[in-house]
């Protein structure tokens, strides 16, 4: 019963709450320059809990027994529901105050419709999924066996061994906030992009785990927990949502993110038992730690392929921002329809100019293909994600050639 309710039911509830919060926070800050920092701060609460709760749980267990401890933990967990009630739908802007509304629209890569699983055809996405499985597999080995390794292999007392998890927790907290802050500077220089931090910290986790083979004593374990915590910050903070939003757009984040979290959960489920089985057979923790280190390093290595895609030069300048004067919304015409009409007119005008200038001979050739029409534009009212579907500027004889190349997830590089 304990495995059923605490393992499955509690795990499912925490998963739903975590994903809901991870999707809600970016929407509240979607027009802010501190979006990644906001996600990092919100997710840092998990690190605070990892820091505070190990000694609290030990105290509750000693004072009230394991049954009383679980009852109190259940009461604390119910506060998630109370805080969840504080989320409110974002208010619509009052469009009746102004006769016209200047709308800034920025194009982005084409994304699938809600409940559309076509993103699964993207090779880049599957690299991200496998990456999370591998890292979670290795990290769960550390979470599941670090205290036992400290107690039975290094002869460290129980309280000091439990404190190691608190060190990991505070490192996760600091790392998540810092990583989110740095990721918000990606417009300053590409080096700050989420994918670069992601690979860096996963690599740090794998290398640091390899040093567990040195048996450096308690001080060495504390230092290791600091590095491992910074690596775990990249696994559960703002970096994964930022990478997926860059691939698919913010409004279509839920399904890809849900699949990634499922891969992560599978890795967490399998890692610790596999290490336990290996320890029972070999009676040595070095082999499980080698497996954890290799798994983490491999997870970082395979992200080189998605990085090549996300760091392509045209993706740094893959959009244009257009100011469109849109009249006040009338009863018989929605704001989305008006914006779609304006966007189509803009695109047709630009393509006509290109033909007149002799830069292209046909609007459907290799430079400008499949011109968007109003019927093709989806979700224009929400950040204009489908306004031009990967419109970008291409210099050609000192002229800005606007390529309005439609792309779908099929266009992601495939192996």
Image (cartoon, helix red, strand yellow):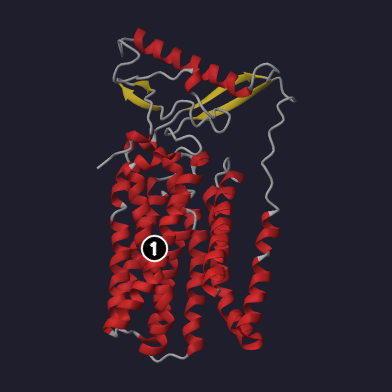
Q: Image quarter for residue 50?
A: bottom right
Judging depth in this view, the residue of 113 and 361 nearest the camera is 113
> Residue 127, how many percent across, how many down?
33, 50
Which residue is painted at 58% across and 75% down in the image?
Answer: 53
Please say if 62 is above or below 337: below
If the image is split into quadrants, where does the N terminus sit?
A: bottom right
Residue 187 drawn above or below residue 155: above
At a point 62% along the width and 84% down the height, the residue shown is: 59
Q: Is residue 368 left or right of residue 348?
A: left
Mark 1, other Cα within 10 Å: few <14 / some 14–19 / many ≥20: many
Q: Quadrant of residue 234?
A: bottom left
In front of the other: 314 or 206: 206
Q: How many marks?
A: 1
Which residue is pictured at 47% across the width and 22% down the height?
Answer: 376
What's the residue at 45%, 12% (across, down)?
349
Q: Does residue 18 appear left or right of residue 303 in this picture?
A: right
Q: Secondary structure at mark 1?
A: helix
- Identity of the residue furthest to the front in this view: 1
Instruction: Please tell me whether residue 187 is drawn above or below residue 408 in the rendered image.
Output: below
From the image, tell me which residue sits under label 1. 267
Residue 377, x across and y down, in percent: 50, 24
x, y percentage for residue 370?
Answer: 37, 19
Residue farthest top in this picture: 356
Going by the picture, which residue comes out furthest to the left? 415
Q: Can you see residue 1?
A: yes
Horizontal and vertical percent for residue 415?
24, 43
Q: Nearer the viewer, residue 240 or 5?
A: 5
**Could one spot residue 192 in this view of the protein?**
no
């Amino acid at each position: 019963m304990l495995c059923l309710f605490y393992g499955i039911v509690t795990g499912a509830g925490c998963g739903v709450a975590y994903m809901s919060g991870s999707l809600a926070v970016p929407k509240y800050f979607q027009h802010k320059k501190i979006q990644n920092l906001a996600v990092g701060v919100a997710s840092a609460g998990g690190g605070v809990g990892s820091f505070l709760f190990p000694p609290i749980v030990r105290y509750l267990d000693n004072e009230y027994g394991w049954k009383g401890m679980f009852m109190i933990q259940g009461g604390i967990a119910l506060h998630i529901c109370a805080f969840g009630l504080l989320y409110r739908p974002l208010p619509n802007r009052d469009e009746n105050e102004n006769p016209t509304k200047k709308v800034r629209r920025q194009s982005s890569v084409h994304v699938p419709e809600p409940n559309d699983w076509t993103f699964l055809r993207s090779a880049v996405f599957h690299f991200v999924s496998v990456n999370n499985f591998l890292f979670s597999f290795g990290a769960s080995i550390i979470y599941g066996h670090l205290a036992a390794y400290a107690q039975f292999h290094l002869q460290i007392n129980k309280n000091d061994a439990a404190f190691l998890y608190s060190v990991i927790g505070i490192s996760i907290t600091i790392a998540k906030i810092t990583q989110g802050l740095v990721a918000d500077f990606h417009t300053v220089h590409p080096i700050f992009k989420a994918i670069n931090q992601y690979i860096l910290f996963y690599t740090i986790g794998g290398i640091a785990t390899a040093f567990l083979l040195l048996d450096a004593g308690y001080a060495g374990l504390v230092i290791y927990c600091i590095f491992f915590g910074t690596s775990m910050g990249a696994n559960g903070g703002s970096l994964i949502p930022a990478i997926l939003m860059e691939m698919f757009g913010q409004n279509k984040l839920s399904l890809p993110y849900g699949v990634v979290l499922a891969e992560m959960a599978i890795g967490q489920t399998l890692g610790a038992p596999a290490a336990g089985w290996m320890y029972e057979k070999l009676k040595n923790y070095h082999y499980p730690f080698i497996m954890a280190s290799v798994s983490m390093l491999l997870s970082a290595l395979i992200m080189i392929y998605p990085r090549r895609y996300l760091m392509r030069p045209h993706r740094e300048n893959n959009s244009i921002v257009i100011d469109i004067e849109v009249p006040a919304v009338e009863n018989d015409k929605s704001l989305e329809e008006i914006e779609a009409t304006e966007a189509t007119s803009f695109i047709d005008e630009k393509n006509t100019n290109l033909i007149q200038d002799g830069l292209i001979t046909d609007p459907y050739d290799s430079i400008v293909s499949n011109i968007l029409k109003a019927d093709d534009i989806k979700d224009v009212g929400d950040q204009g994600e489908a306004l031009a579907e990967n419109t970008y500027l291409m210099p050609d004889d000192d002229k800005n050639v606007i390529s309005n190349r439609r792309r779908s997830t099929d266009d992601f590089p495939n192996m």
